[in-house]
Amino acid sequence: MSSTNRHISNTALQAAITPKKLCPNIVEFLLENGADINAPAGANFGRTALQAAASSVTPDLEILDLLLRHHADVNAPPARKGGVTALQGAAIHGHMEVARILLAHGAHVNAPAAPEEGRTAVEGAAEHGRWEMVRLLLSEGAMPDPVFGFSRAIKLAEEELHLGIAKLLRKENPCNRLLTDFCDPSDKHLHG
């Protein structure tokens, strides 16, 4: 197995941006000397440079700006297992300013989750109790799954006892809106 598939940070640039090593001077040096700003994330819990910056426990807006000025891909796909897009990482950690910056740079609010152990932006925000983030994502056009609606996000929120978020998502669920908009609850045909 290659080191690319085993490690979260697999390039010098990605390593310089890992949560405990935010080093703007090193990041700038690497970029000026040809580091691949869009090197893909490792397969298991890996992050691109921008994904690592957006997912940091304490994001550095200087590094985020530097990466975006060097054309980091705001919609780079997540690692196969446990990966996140930059916006999903910001949503999970509740980084409102980072999310707004990424959205302003064209981040897809409805990007699919990683195939294994992944979360969409709304699911991650709901699971971690990020009320304002959920509202931001909804206002930016977050769409529910066409078949299941927001059921997964609601379930994740409820499992973590974020009941207000679950209630908000139920209200936004298209199935519920269809029932509310097109069905009269007093209709005797509904109740037998």
Image: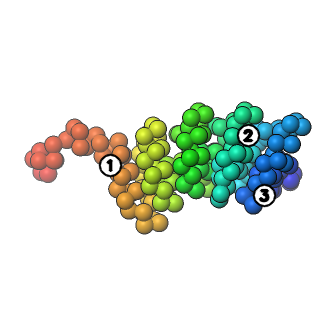
Q: In this orientation, which residue lies closer to the viewer: 192 or 65?
A: 65
Instruction: Name the colour scheme.
Output: rainbow
- Amino acid found under the numbered disc labelled 2: Leu
Residue located 86% across and 53% down the image: 3
Dots 1, 2 in contact, CB < 8 A:
no
Picture quadrant of residue 29: top right
- Residue that numbered label 3 is attached to: 21
- Residue that numbered label 1 is attached to: 171
Dot 2 falls on a residue whose secondary structure is helix
Residue located 11% across and 47% down the image: 186
Q: Position of residue 112 (x, y in %)?
A: 57, 42
Please tell me the numbered disc located at residue 66.
Answer: 2
Residue 34, compared with residue 186, is above or below; it is: above
Q: Is residue 152 visible?
A: no
Residue located 69% across and 40% down the image: 65
Mark before the other along the chain sequence, 1 or 2:
2
Q: Badge 1, how many Cα within 10 Å: few under 14, some, many 20+?
A: some
Q: Badge 3, how many Cα within 10 Å: few under 14, some, many 20+?
A: few
